[in-house]
Amino acid sequence: RIAQRGVRARDIVTIECETAEGIVHRLWEPLEAKRRPRNGYAAKFSIPYGVAYGLLHGAAGLEAFSDANAADPALRELAGKVAYRIDPSNPYPREFTGHVRATLRDGRVVEERQPHLRGGQHEPLSRAELEAKFRDNCRHGGWSDALADSWLAWVGEAFDAPVALERFRA
């Protein structure tokens, strides 16, 4: 969202995220290691990496967590600017929240807050978003677009049409 507002990585001096104490040990610490994950797998458990990737690329799908991306100097530089502050009122684990506050070179502070998990019960993904995610995952797994489309068509037929239970009687 900050990138959508026109903030560019080169304009950022620092990024501070409010976070829940319950996730610090897994996703924030040790901070220097989380800022420079050693490979794509380690990047999956790094909020600084995820914030940097999102700012630079807009969204993070499976491709975000490759070894090559984890070693990208631009990602590492931006992730090195990401820090955290524990928010004692964070509702984790009842809710998974997000908060980013970027201080820019010109002195402005740009902030975004996500009160709940995107794609969760309070803000579910639309059908179009779910289908796009399915297609991305299929592509990542080596499926052709045609094969993914045929599966989506089958699922649509299976779940959108009225269910005729009579055909299942013994």
Image (cartoon, rainbow, N blue to C red):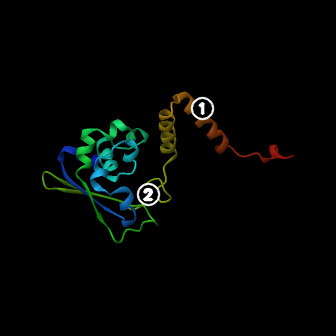
Q: Position of residue 15 (x, y in %)?
A: 24, 55
Whichever of callouts 2 and 1 sits on the residue coming sooner in the sequence is 2
What amino acid type should be assigned to the residue bearing mark 2?
Answer: Leu
Category of crowding for the residue at label 2, using alpha-carbon neighbours closer than 10 angstroms: few (below 14), some (14–19), many (at least 20): some
Residue 117 image-quadrant placement:
bottom left
* Residue found at x 52% / y 28%: 144
Q: How many marks?
A: 2
What's the mark number on residue 139?
none
Q: Residues within 10 Å of mark 1 (few under 14, many from 20)?
A: few
- Residue at the left extreme, as displayed: 106
Give, as a three-letter code, the residue at label 1: Ser
Q: Which mark is residue 150?
A: 1
Q: Position of residue 22 (x, y in %)?
A: 40, 65
Residue 19 can be seen, yes or no: yes
Instruction: State whether residue 6 appears in this view.
Output: no
Frontmost residue, 109 versus 90: 90
Residue 117 is marked as 2
Secondary structure under tag 1 reads: helix
Write the residue at 44% across / 64% down: 95
Q: Residue furthest bottom?
A: 89
Left of 52 or right of it: where is 118?
A: right
x and y, in percent, of residue 101 in the image: 25, 58
Mark 2, secondary structure of its residue: loop
Is 160 placed left or right of 136 in the picture?
right
Q: Vertically, is 6 above or below 116?
A: above
Residue visible at 37% across and 56% down in the picture: 27
Between residues 156 and 35, which one lies in front from this camera angle? 35
**Residue drawn 50% across the image and 36% down it:** 135
Percent position of residue 116, x then y:
42, 60
Task: Mark 2 and mark 1 in contact? Answer it, CB < 8 Å.
Answer: no
- State the CA–CA distance, disc 2 to disc 1: 30 Å
